[in-house]
Amino acid sequence: MSVRIVVRSFSELCITAGTVIVLFVVYLLYWTGVKADHAASDQMSGLQRQWAAQSPPPRPAASPQSTAPAGSEGPPAPAAYAEGRSFAVMYIPRLGKDWHEPVLEGTAVKDLQKGLGHYANTAPLGQQGNFSVAGHRRTYGDPFKDFPELRPGDAVVLRDDSTWYTYRIDNKPYRTVPSDVGVIDAVPAKSPFRSPGRYLTLTTCDPEWGSSHRLIAWGHLDSTQPVTRGGPPALDG
C-alpha cells in the first residue's frame, strides 16, 4: 500500500470522525433541547387541562401571606403522585423572567427529559419533610444551567392544582459528590436546618458538561396561597 493511499485513508477517517463529533454536539446542544421543550410544553398543557376540568372546586389553602414554620399546620396533603406524571410547575425568577418547568414524579432518565423530577422517597409539595427535585444542568433544555447563580433569599415558587407555594433559598449552592444521598434527607445534615420543617432541596450536576459532582440548594417554605387569589408576590419581583 503506497504512502498516498495511507494518507488518503487516514484523512477520510478523520473527516468521518469529525463529522460524527459535530453531529453529536448538535444533538446535545440543539436537538435534545427541542425535544425537551416540546415534552415540557406537552406536560404543562396537560396540567392546565387537568386543573381546568377539576371538580369539585380546589381545596382551601392558607392565606396569601401565611408562613409555614416547622411544626405548624400546612396545606392539606395532596393525593399520591403518579410515577412519571407531572403534578406541578416550578418558577424561579432568579433563573429568568419566563423560566418555568413542569415537575414530574420520579428522577428516571425519561422523567428528566420532560422537565424536573421529584425524588419519590421525599416529602410531597408543601408538606412536613424535604420536597426534593432534580434537573439537568445541560442538555434537554438546560433547565438548571444557571443554578450557581442562586442566592439566599431567592424565591422558588411552585403551583399545583389548588395552591401556590413560595419557598426561599437558604444557601449558596453547595458542591458535593453523587454518593452524598443525605442531601435529600428530611433534615439534611449539611444544610442550614437543624430541626424538622417544610423544606426544599434542588439538585443538579456539576460541572456543566459533566456529572462528577452535584450542586445542592436548600430552602424552606415561606408562604402559600390559593390559586383562586392569583399568583404570589414573589413572581412579580
Image (cartoon, rainbow, N blue to C red):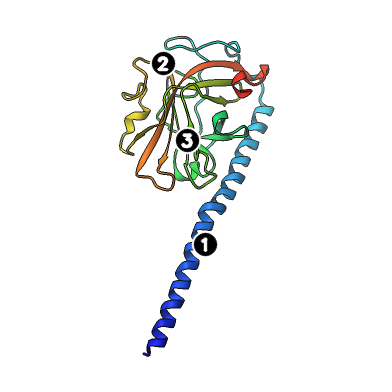
Q: What is the spatial separation of the Cα atoms under label 2 and label 1, in whole angstroms?
A: 47 Å
Q: Secondary structure at mark 3?
A: helix
Discs 3, 2 touching: Cβ within 8 Å = no
Seen at 66% across and 25% down, the residue is 54
As drawn, the label of residue 147 is: 3
Residue shown at the point (50%, 21%) measured from the top left: 167
Above/below status of 194 relative to 18:
above
Marks 3 and 2, how far apart in space? 24 Å
Q: Position of residue 107 (x, y in %)?
A: 44, 38
Q: Residue furthest bottom?
A: 2
The reply to whether callout 1 and callout 3 are in contact (CB within 8 Å) is no
Nearest to viewer (mark 1 / mark 3)? 3
Q: Is 54 drawn above or below residue 19 in the view shown?
A: above
Q: Amino acid at mark 3?
A: Phe
Q: Which mark is residue 23?
A: 1
Disc on the earlier residue, 3 or 2 = 3
The picture places residue 49, in percent across and down from the top left corner, at 67, 33
Residue 65 picture location, percent across and down:
58, 11
Residue for badge 2: 197
